[in-house]
Amino acid sequence: MQSASINKYLRRLEKNLLRIEDFQEKGCPVDSSMGELYLDLKNLGAYLQQAQIENKSTISQELAESTERYKELLLKYESLADKLQSREDRGVVASSKTLPLWFEGLSKVCPNFWGSFERLATAFGLGMIGFTIIGPSYFLAVGQITFAQYYQLEMTTLNALVFVLGIFIGLLLHEFAHAMVLAHNGIGIKRVGAMAGSMLGGFVEAEESSFLQAHPRVHFRFNAVGIGTNLLLAVVLMLIGGLMSSQVLIFLGLGSLFFGFINSYPIKPLDGGWVYGDLVNSYLKDDKVRSSLLTLPLLMFVVWILLFVRSALM
């Protein structure tokens, strides 16, 4: 990387940090952007450190200036991260010892089972993303939900409450799946908990060092298993509910399906966005092709709007 390229890279990171600061002042969630900026800073820091080692005897003025700019930017990032952490902790209930240790112990019981579960849930996670893209498109184009004709459903008060319960169960199992992938692959779990702030839900926080050192395949599975577990649970409950003519089981399954659905659209910081990004970045090397494919989810919104307008005018 040439000096001009380093300076250009630093300017881009500085602009990103200013943009993140502006967003967080407006109360917007910035966790995803902070994570991406952290990785960029980490990669740049590693490069500068290696460059200093290789040119130890004659460190150029440009390299020294770039290193100082990097250090200043890193300090600003850490200051903003501390501010965000203190703000988030006000609405967070988390376990940093009991639950992480419990997941670690559970992963050692029948490790082959958890490995199979991880692979199965990952496959279902890909299916969940496909359903999230194709399902609304089909509904807006045709005007009906295909599987709904097989169930005679009534939205009673009881069924509505069961649906909400299904969302809650889906949330618990979603985070459970994330935690088990970390524990099964020997990645430390920093915290497990719930939050009520700019976003409402649960979270599993991995230890940064062990997570970043893990194979990209583990990152992919970690992102995919949550939504995959939601779909897997929904399929099981709705199949059994259909066979038993039990609307309670069906609405439980629909609740889990709904929770997985809203987390599956391929835009970050949703799980679907991380999975889609992992797929594109892992299998495509051409930057232009990757950039084009990463904009496809936004184009899908445009297609949905056009289909909605068409159906409204018909």
Image (cartoon, rainbow, N blue to C red):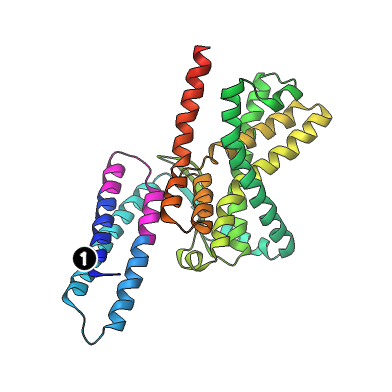
Q: Which residues are magenta?
A: 19-39
Count of numbered badges drawn on the protein: 1
Give the residue at x 16% y 75%: 61
Q: Magenta: predominant secondary structure element?
A: helix
Q: Decide: is 103 above or below 194.
A: below
Left or right, residue 235 beside residue 140 = right
- The residue that disc 1 covers is 69
Query: Residue 139: percent from the left, percent from the top?
Result: 60, 25
> For residue 23: magenta?
yes
Does the rendering let one see residue 173?
no
Q: Nearer the viewer, residue 188 or 228?
A: 228
Query: Residue 221: percent from the left, percent from the top?
Result: 59, 56
Query: Residue 23: percent from the left, percent from the top?
Result: 30, 42
Does the rendering let one see residue 59?
yes
Give the residue at x 58% y 50%: 224
Left or right, residue 282 beside residue 6 = right
Give the residue at x 63% y 26%: 161
Judging from the image, what secondary structure is the residue with disc 1 in? Answer: helix
Q: Decide: is 239 above or below 292.
A: above
Residue most toward the top?
314
Q: Nearer the viewer, residue 164 or 240?
A: 240
Quadrant of the frame with the N terminus: bottom left
Give the residue at x 47% y 46%: 293
Query: Residue 29: percent from the left, percent from the top?
Result: 38, 43
> For residue 85: magenta?
no
| Tag 1: amino acid | Arg
Crowd around label 1: few <14 · some 14–19 · many ≥20 (10 Å): some
